[in-house]
Amino acid sequence: MSLVAGLLRPDSGSILFRGTNIAELDDTACARLRSRHFGVVPQRGGLLPYLTAEENVAFAMNLAGVEARKREITAQLDELGVAHRSRHFPREMSGGEAVRVSVAMALASKPELILADEATGELDPATARETMDVIVKRSIDHGVTLLYVTHDVQMADKAERSFTLTDKELRAS
């Protein structure tokens, strides 16, 4: 996932997005591409600790060139069940709440590609399903490609296409 997001460079090969080889971009160009076109939900973290939940979402929107309107930010947080935490800093949230704010950040930027790396791994099963349903619905509603990594078979079953990575071998499931 870090390779696709341009956070790591491949030892060989290429990673193409809209005809651009991400592996050949410098760090600045790669960060610009990621912030404007990708919604990234990291496995852990993702929030800026000195910003509140709503400020984190607004920051992601501004980086993507999307006007950060308060009602849209609130709607994003509300859809994920964390609007009541809008004025809280990450240290004041549970791990699950922080994950859902991170998802709100990724979706609020209106990305062309959503990359979710074990996005629901820290959530209880019911909240994980609800959160993944929001991500999948948004990707379908907006015609956005969703690439996610999961160890949860039920989450994998939501995918149109799935692959299994075992012993360094990738296989279509």
Image (tube, rainbow, N blue to C red):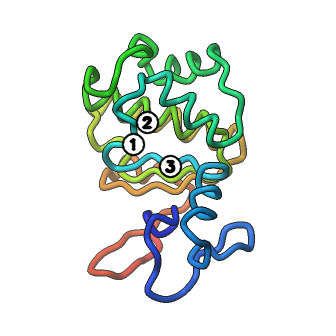
In screen coordinates, is 104 left or right of 52? right
Q: Secondary structure at mark 3?
A: strand
Q: Where does the C terminus fall, quadrant-wise? A: bottom left
| Of residues 135 and 75, the one drawn nearer to the viewer in this rendering | 75
- Residue 58 image-quadrant placement: top right
Mark before the other along the chain sequence, 1 or 2: 1
Q: Secondary structure at mark 1?
A: loop
Task: Report, in whole angstroms, how far the alpha carbon at label 3 lies from the one at label 1.
Answer: 9 Å
x then y, percent, for residue 172: 47, 73
Circle on res. 102: 2
Circle on res. 40: 3
Q: Which residue is mark 1?
A: 46
Pointer 3 with pointer 1, Cβ within 8 A:
yes
x then y, percent, for residue 146: 57, 52
| Of residues 136 and 59, the one drawn nearer to the viewer in this rendering | 59
Q: Residue at x 65, y 25 (%)?
A: 68
Q: Is residue 102 above or below residue 170?
A: above
- Which amino acid, by three-letter code, is at mark 1? Gly
